[in-house]
């Protein structure tokens, strides 16, 4: 037997993006259903997944505005004071540091699991929000008047607007006739925590070496998030290594730049596929988070964009309510789409170009990336733009 439930807004996906939208609308006179196939216990206490999310200053401000930031413990926030980009064995480094605002940090690193936990904690307290956990969206029907979602347990929920925040491989996106540009890099990213002998001094290092890309993201104490990107075939060899051999492999691959290292977490592997939806909206339907823009992680913009999108879409919904309009009015949805495309498309294209240039081992590409670093260092305008984009001000 089906139970019918009627809401104003249906959000499929209680990931960081879907939860941010729900939290943004905490005080709105709306009924919201948040649907996720994961259990409520998992959503409330997500396990560590190896991702340390580099949040821009704009994003930390947004999480503060949502009231989620206050639920983070001090040790979950690692300030990022400086970022350095290295190319191969060259000692030449391109450095970025936030100079405005009295030496404020470029941003902060926060574990993805902590972001999910705190946003969930925030939304769970929200009077206008009902959670449907442990049942995925199995089918969607949309007509002129409403959107209907059938859950895998047979329940049917209706709403005026359906927002799909259901990962970069969104199952709801194609159902609304929306295609997506997918770029498969054929590479895998490994992420884990390591302890190391030499201090990181709060510097994030992105090291584009021959055949591998390494990032060291500074955490509290002499610990970092180690991020290694390799050809998918080479990564399979790393996967078979025991923890001790893996630690020696990290020392070898980093040239002992950080001294001796020890593994401090499980290892997590992410195949690298970037996704950009051809449209972000359809009648009574909007894409949010990775379902709209699934970034290559090298420039650390995925969730920053997801959060931006949640605020932009939330603003359109709030304006519609204020003017007593339909929350799915086409003008509002297309304003969200236009604004979010403008904010994300240039960086999506630039990130893919960087990822490709720095994984290309042909001599011309190697020459071009060395030259690119020097050119960027010598061009204050270009450096400033990257610094602004790192802090979220661009
Ligand atoms: C290694 C790595 C490092 C990263 N580093 C950074 C960084 O430094 N900075 C940054 O800004 N971003 C970073 N990102 C990107 C960031 O993690 C993502 O952008 C963000 O997690 C996406 O959030 P989301 O809510 O859109 O999707 P997801 O986190 O994928 O959540 C989607 C949710 O939808 C649910 N779901 C899916 N299908 C259904 C269905 N049919 N029915 C119900 N529920 C469903 C899932 O269970 C899940 O809970 C990184 C990503 C990776 C892989």
Image (cartoon, grey):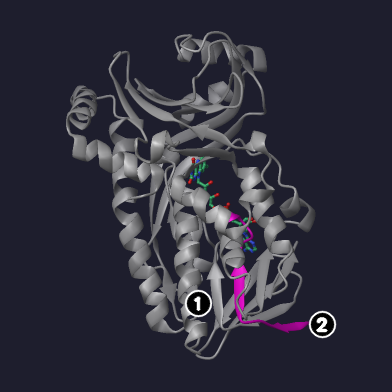
Residue at image coords 70%, 79%:
156
Q: Does residue 368 show up magenta in the picture?
A: no
Task: Estimate the x, y position of residue 15 in percent, counting from the top left.
Answer: 61, 56
Ligand 1 closer than 8 Å to label 1 CB:
no
Q: Which-is-in-front pick, marks 2 and 1?
A: 1
- Identify the magenta region: 1-16
Q: Residue 138: which quarter of the image?
A: bottom right
Q: Which mark is residue 93?
A: none
Q: Which mark is residue 1?
A: 2
Name the residue carrying label 1.
Answer: 317
Mark-to-mark CA distance, 2 and 1 = 33 Å
Describe residue 201's horizontal placement relative to residue 276 as left or right: right
Judge the density around disc 1: few (<14), some (14-19), many (≥20) Cα neighbours within 10 Å.
many
Q: Residue 230: which quarter of the image?
A: top left
Residue placed most toward the observer, 312 or 7: 312
For the question of whether residue 52 can be seen, the reply is no
């Amino acid at each position: 037997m089906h139970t019918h439930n009627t809401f104003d807004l249906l959000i499929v996906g209680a990931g960081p993006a879907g939860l941010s939208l729900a939290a943004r609308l905490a005080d709105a006179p709306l009924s919201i259903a948040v649907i996720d196939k994961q259990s409520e216990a998992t959503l409330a206490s997500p396990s560590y997944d190896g991702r340390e999310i580099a949040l821009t200053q704009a994003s930390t401000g947004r999480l503060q505005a949502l009231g989620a930031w206050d639920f983070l413990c001090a040790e979950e926030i690692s300030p990022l004071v400086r970022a350095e980009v290295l190319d191969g064995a060259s000692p030449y480094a391109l450095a970025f540091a936030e100079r405005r605002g009295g030496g404020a940090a470029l941003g902060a690193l926060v574990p993805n699991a902590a972001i999910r936990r705190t946003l969930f904690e925030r939304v769970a307290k929200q009077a206008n929000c009902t959670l449907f956990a442990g049942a995925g969206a199995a089918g969607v029907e949309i007509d002129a008047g409403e959107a209907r979602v059938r859950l895998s347990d047979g329940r049917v929920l209706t709403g005026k607007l359906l927002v799909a925040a259901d990962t970069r491989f969104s199952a709801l996106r194609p159902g609304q006739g929306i295609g997506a540009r997918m770029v498969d890099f054929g590479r895998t990213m490994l992420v884990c925590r390591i302890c190391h002998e030499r201090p990181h001094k709060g510097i994030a290092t992105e090291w584009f070496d021959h055949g591998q890309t390494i990032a060291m993201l500074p955490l509290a104490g002499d610990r970092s998030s180690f991020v290694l990107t390799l050809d998918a075939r080479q990564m399979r060899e790393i996967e078979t290594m025991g923890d001790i051999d893996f630690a020696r492999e990290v020392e070898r691959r980093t040239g002992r730049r950080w001294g001796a290292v020890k593994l401090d977490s499980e290892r997590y592997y992410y195949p690298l596929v970037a996704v950009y939806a051809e449209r972000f909206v359809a009648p009574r339907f909007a894409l949010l988070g990775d379902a709209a823009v699934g970034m290559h992680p090298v420039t650390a913009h995925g969730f920053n964009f997801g959060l931006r999108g949640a605020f932009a879409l939330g603003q359109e919904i709030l304006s519609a309510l204020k003017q007593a309009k339909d929350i799915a009015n086409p003008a509002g949805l297309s304003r969200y789409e236009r604004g979010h495309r403008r904010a994300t498309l240039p960086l999506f294209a630039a990130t893919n170009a960087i990822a490709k240039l720095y994984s290309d081992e042909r001599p011309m590409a190697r020459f071009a990336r060395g030259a690119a670093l020097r050119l960027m260092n010598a061009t204050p305008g270009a450096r400033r733009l990257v610094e602004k984009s790192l802090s979220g001000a661009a």
